[in-house]
Amino acid sequence: MGGILFVVSAPSGAGKSTLGAELLKTDPNLVYSVSLTTRSPRRGESHGKDYFFVAEDEFLKRRKKGDLIESALVHGFWYGTPQDQLEKLLREGRDVLLDIDVQGGRQIKKLFPSAVLIFIAPPSITELEHRLRTRSQDDEAAIQKRLDNARNEIAQAGDYEYLILNRDIGESVQKLRSIVWAERSKMDPEVLKGV
Ligand code: 5GP
């Protein structure tokens, strides 16, 4: 019996990283899958914890070798999920949280039909723009690119199984936690036999 794979996608600035971090803090059976990326670290991010920050040639080499279970170009940079880490955790029965974009979510759903897809959306694009500007981590061109990407992701997220409109972090964390527990509580006749 393997662990459950939770895929959380959201336009950047929708609050997904904060939500994911809050959930992980209080759920010891949930493990975060650290992706590879070719973008540079932002302030406060560290290698191996937030991402494995790699050069493009290394990323493409690992992708070609088949080390990545899925990969996508997002805002002009490569992102990908390392396969060995993910499969090992699931085999060990750990539930895994993937924070990836909707293209990645689709690829994962094809490979793992039982993966649970959760989309986190900002209350509105105007609110998202406000959040991106106040966190001031990106220049104007990057903000415009992220807004375009957000509209795109929202348009593509209709096939996700759960939607959380992130108006309030506390409430959204509760919703995310409820989804995780609902999925863990699904009927399993094998488990029931042992009761
Ligand atoms: P950021 O640069 O803001 O951390 O992430 C940008 C986008 O890339 C986010 O939507 C994030 O979910 C996505 N992302 C992060 N890691 C991966 C990955 O391994 N695969 C895919 N497909 N997307 C990823």
Image (cartoon, rainbow, N blue to C red):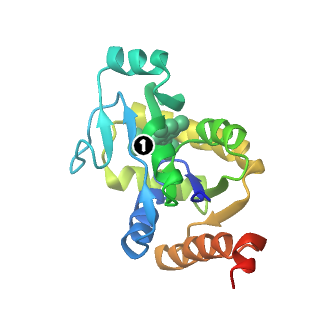
* Residue hosting label 1: 85
Residue most extreme to the front: 194
In the image, what residue occupies the spot 57% across and 59% down? 3
Q: Quadrant of the N terminus?
A: bottom right
- The x and y percentages for residue 173 are 51, 74
Dot 1: what SS?
A: helix
- The x and y percentages for residue 31 are 43, 59
Relative to the observer, which residue lies in front, 164 or 5?
Answer: 5
Q: Quadrant of residue 102?
A: top right
In the image, what residue occupies the spot 48% across and 29% down? 68
Give the amino acid at mark 1: Gln
Total marks placed: 1
Relative to the observer, which residue lies in front, 95 or 169?
Answer: 95
In the image, what residue occupies the spot 57% across and 70% down? 176
User: Seen in the image, is 189 located left or right of residue 13?
Assistant: right
Relative to the observer, which residue lies in front, 184 or 123?
Answer: 184
In the image, what residue occupies the spot 72% across and 38% down? 110
In the displayed structure, 19 sits above or below 49; it is below
- The x and y percentages for residue 157 are 70, 47
Q: Quadrant of residue 103?
A: top right
In the displayed structure, 150 sits above or below 32; it is above
Q: Is residue 144 visible?
A: no
Q: Quadrant of the C terminus?
A: bottom right
In the displayed structure, 5 sits above or below 30; it is above
Q: Is residue 32 visible?
A: yes
